[in-house]
C-alpha cells in the first residue's frame, strides 16, 4: 500500500468515525427531547443546579477570605464568583448525567460499529 492510498484510507476512516460520533450524539439526544426540543430538559437541570452554585459561592468566598494573610473584599468576591461558577458547573454536570450517559452510550456503539467495519474491510474473513 502506497503512502497516498494509506493516507486516503486513513482520512476516509476518520470521516466515518466523526460521522458515527455525530450520529451517536443525535441518537442519544433524541431520547431526552420534550416536545421536539432539548431546552426544557436543560432548563430544568439548570434550575436544579442553583443549589450547588450557592454552596460554591459560600465555599469559594470562605477560601478567598482565608486563603492568605491579607484579607480583602476583592479576594472574597473573586473567590465567591469562582466558587459559584464551579458549583453551578458541577451541579449541571450532575443533573444532566442521564443525558450524558445516553449520548456517550450511543456514541460508543456507533464508533464501535465503524471500527468493526473498518477492521473487517482490512481483514476479510474467507469461509471458503
Image (cartoon, helix red, strand yellow):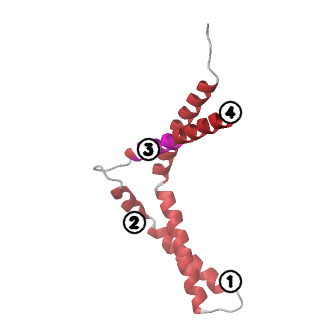
Mark sitting on residue 47:
2
Q: Label 4: which residue?
A: 2
Rendered view: 94 above or below 82: above
- Along the line of sight, the residue nearer the viewer: 120 or 32: 120
Rendered view: 56 above or below 23: below
- Describe the element under mark 3 as helix, strand or loop: helix
- Give neighbour class at mark 1: few <14, some 14-19, many 20+ (Cα, 10 Å): some
Q: CA distance from mark 1 to mark 4?
A: 60 Å
Instruction: Verify whether residue 113 appears in magenta.
Output: no
Quadrant for the N terminus in the image: top right
Between discs 1 and 4, the one toward the N terminus: 4
- Give neighbour class at mark 4: few <14, some 14-19, many 20+ (Cα, 10 Å): few
Q: Nearer the viewer, mark 3 or mark 2?
A: 3
Q: Nearer the viewer, mark 2 or mark 4?
A: 4
- Describe the element under mark 1 as helix, strand or loop: loop
The image shows residue 45 at horizontal and vertical percentages of: 41, 60
- Give neighbour class at mark 2: few <14, some 14-19, many 20+ (Cα, 10 Å): few
Disc tally is: 4
Between discs 3 and 1, the one toward the N terminus: 3
Rendered view: 120 above or below 71: above
Report the magenta residues as a range: 18-29
Question: Is residue 35 left or right of 79 when viewed as pictured?
Answer: left
The image shows residue 7 at horizontal and vertical percentages of: 63, 39
Q: Label 3: which residue?
A: 28
Q: What is the magenta segment's predominant secondary structure?
A: helix
Q: CA distance from mark 3 to mark 2?
A: 22 Å
Q: Nearer the viewer, mark 3 or mark 1?
A: 3
Q: CA distance from mark 1 to mark 2?
A: 30 Å
Question: Is residue 91 left or right of 59 when viewed as pictured?
Answer: left
Rendered view: 118 above or below 45: above
Amino acid at each position: 500500500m502506497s503512502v497516498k492510498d494509506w493516507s486516503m484510507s486513513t482520512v476516509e476512516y476518520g470521516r466515518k468515525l466523526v460521522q458515527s460520533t455525530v450520529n451517536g450524539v443525535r441518537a442519544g439526544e433524541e431520547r431526552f427531547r420534550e416536545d421536539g426540543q432539548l431546552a426544557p430538559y436543560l432548563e430544568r437541570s439548570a434550575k436544579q443546579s442553583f443549589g450547588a452554585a450557592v454552596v460554591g459561592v459560600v465555599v469559594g468566598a470562605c477560601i478567598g477570605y482565608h486563603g492568605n494573610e491579607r484579607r480583602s473584599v476583592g479576594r472574597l468576591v473573586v473567590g465567591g464568583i469562582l466558587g459559584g461558577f464551579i458549583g453551578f458547573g458541577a451541579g449541571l454536570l450532575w443533573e444532566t448525567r442521564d443525558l450524558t450517559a445516553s449520548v456517550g452510550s450511543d456514541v460508543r456503539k456507533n464508533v464501535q460499529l465503524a471500527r468493526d467495519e473498518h477492521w473487517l474491510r482490512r481483514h476479510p474473513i474467507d469461509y471458503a
